[in-house]
Amino acid sequence: MTTLTAGEVEVTPPRRRTWGWTRGLGVSGWLSIGVLVLVLLLAVVGPLLASQDPNEGNLAQGFGAPSVEHWLGQDANGRDLLTRLVVGARTAVIGPLLVVVASTILGTVLALAAAWFGGWFDTAVARVVDAVFAFPGLLLAILATALFGAGLPAAVAALSIAYTPYMARIARSAALRERGMPYIAALRVQGIHGLSICVRHILPNIRTLVLANATISFGFALIDLAGLSFIGLGVQPPTADWGAMVGEGLAGILQRYPQESFYAGALIVATVAAANVLGDRLTTRSEGRS
């Protein structure tokens, strides 16, 4: 590794390991990764493996008990629960992923720009972030669905905007700390362009923290979107979705058939718990590095 010189001070840029973020996760961290990978695989290939139509049912077989043909039983409309849970994974996961990807990219770009340019630009970004951060994300999503109609696109767009300040605030603090490191001054003395320094040096050294907050945000976004589907503003019936299934299963609970709400709710809880545990582990590792 090349040693850089800034004046009379020798500075060596920190070494970056491609898979360094996986070190020190512990058993809980790896179990959380396993759960999230299984959920993602279920979302990707699950609908392709479904042997039954998730929207086709038989009212005469409503609340059917588990059987050889219907392993987890049937819902109020006689639809196979296992098939709807498997197919519903795609709608339950794709929305939060879109929210996290959009908010992480936008928030990180704003954070790097604010940390690099500083001055009035940093102040302006900080004030805008604070203003949007004070507005509840779920309320913004409800307003968006009221204006543009119920469904996933409006809710995802609204939550992406609402989550951006959270990502920007965390990334900005880390980027400001990294920008003050001696090796950054050495790179600037050498005349390396600011964009190159941000992309090749600052961003790789804050990526673990960014990934940690993106992972935690995925869990929160899943809860928010599931909540919207629960009250009928997210994914619309008859499309299978975990949040919508929790709401549709309420009638079954009153008739002593809680399976639909229980299974869908359990999948939501397990996914969110795995995302939070992994995010906490990554955050701890990032703080230990700093």
Image (spheres, grey):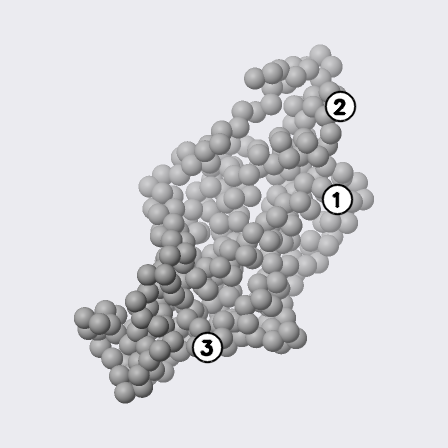
Identify the residue shown where x is 65% and y is 50%: 106
Image spot of residue 118 (x, y percent):
76, 39
Is 290 or 185 nearer to us in this picture?
Answer: 185
Quickly name the residue at label 2. Answer: 191
Q: Which mark is residue 122?
A: 1
Kindly state the secondary structure of the residue where label 2 is placed. Answer: loop
Kindly state the secondary structure of the residue where label 1 is placed. Answer: helix
Image spot of residue 52 (x, y percent):
31, 70
Few, some or many C-alpha atoms within 10 Å of disc 2 (few <14, some 14-19, many ≥20)?
A: few
Q: Which of the 4 image quarters holds residue 262?
A: bottom left
Image spot of residue 82 (x, y percent):
30, 68
Residue projecting furthest to the top: 8
Lower sequence index among marks 3 and 1 = 1
Camera sees residue 222: yes
Residue projecting furthest to the right: 120
Three-letter code for the amino acid on which mark 1 is drawn: Asp
Q: With respect to residue 235, does 194 lie above or below?
A: above
Three-letter code for the amino acid on which mark 2 is drawn: Gly
Q: Quadrant of the N terminus?
A: top right
Quickly name the residue at label 3. Answer: 237
